[in-house]
Amino acid sequence: MIKHTADNSRGAVEHTLGLSNLILFFSLPFKPAGSRNLFLNGHIALFVEGTIYQVYDPKRLKVDFLFSRMPASDWLFGDGGSWVYRNSASPRFTHVYLYGKCESRRTIVYYAGVDVASAVMQQVKASIFDDESRFGRGDSRFNILANNCSSITAAALNRGDLVEARALNRIPALLFKSFVTGCAREYDVRVGKFAMYDNSAFELHRYCIGTGMTHPEKAVDRWIVAQTDRRCTRRPFWPLRSTAVETEK
C-alpha cells in the first residue's frame, strides 16, 4: 500500500518521517535563479534512523569524505551558510549545504519511506561503511556517470535486498521508481513530496533524466498516481500539493 500526506509544514513532515526508519529521497534538478547548469539528473539521499547519507563529488567540494552525514532536520530545514560544515561537537556528521541552503529551500523533494527489520538496516549501514572505507583508501572514486550519488546509494539498498542491482540505478529518478515498486511488494511505502523551495533564488529545470518528459514534477506526480492505483486497495491522499488533506481511515 502507498500512503501519502500533502501537508508540508515542518511539524507534519517531521511527523511523517518519524513513521519510517529508512527513507529514500529524490530531489528534482535545479539551478540558481538566472544561471545555467547541466545537472539534469536530480539527486538521491538516504535517511537511515535519523541520519541523512548523501554523496556529492568530493573533488568539486574539496573534501576528503564520500558520504555527507547529517541529521535529517538539518538537511531538510537547516541553513548552514556555507557549503561544507564540520560539526566539531559531533565529528560523526559532515554536513553539506549546497549554496548554503537546506534541501527543501532549493528544490522539490520526493520521499518513499519504509520500516525495515534491524538485519536489513545493518546490511545497508555496512555497505555505506564499506564504500566510505574504500574511498578513504583510494580504492574507489566518485564518477558522475558510473559511480555517483544514485549508484552508490543503490548499492547500499541492494545489500539490504531493497532494490535489484541494475545499471539504470545510476539515474536518481529510476532508482526512486525501482525502490517504490520493489518495496511495495513487501512493505507499506509512504510516498510524498515537499514543495517549499524558494523560487526567487532557485529555479527547477524543465527536464529531468529518467522522468520521460518535460515538467518533471508533473511527470513524477503522475507516475506515483499510476503506481498507487495499480498497487493499493484504497484511494491515495491526493493530489500531490502543498495543502493539508485529511487522512483516510
Image: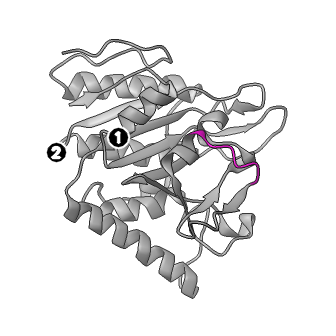
In which quadrant of the rendered image does the C terminus lie?
A: top left
Quadrant hosting residue 206: top right
Which residue, given by chain and number where applicable, does mark 1 sit on?
18
Quadrant hosting residue 120: bottom left
Q: Is residue 19 above or below residue 233?
A: below
As helix, strand or loop, the secondary structure at mark 2 comes to: loop
Q: Residue 84's spot in the image, x, y percent?
A: 70, 60
Q: Residue 231's spot in the image, x, y percent?
A: 20, 29
* Residue 165 visible in the displayed image: no
| Circles 1 and 2 in contact, beta carbons < 8 Å | no
Residue at screen point 74% across, 47% down: 100
Residue at screen point 80% across, 40% down: 36
Which residue, given by chain and number where applicable, does mark 2 sit on?
186
Would you say 231 lies left or right of 40 here? left
- Magenta residues (range): 77-82
Q: Is residue 57 magenta?
A: no
Q: Is 4 in front, or is 86? A: 86
Kindly report the secondary structure that dominates the magenta region of the rendered protein. Answer: loop
- Foreground tag (1 vs 2): 1
Q: Is residue 81 magenta?
A: yes
Give the residue type that dot 2 points to.
Answer: Glu
Q: Is 249 in front, or is 204? A: 249
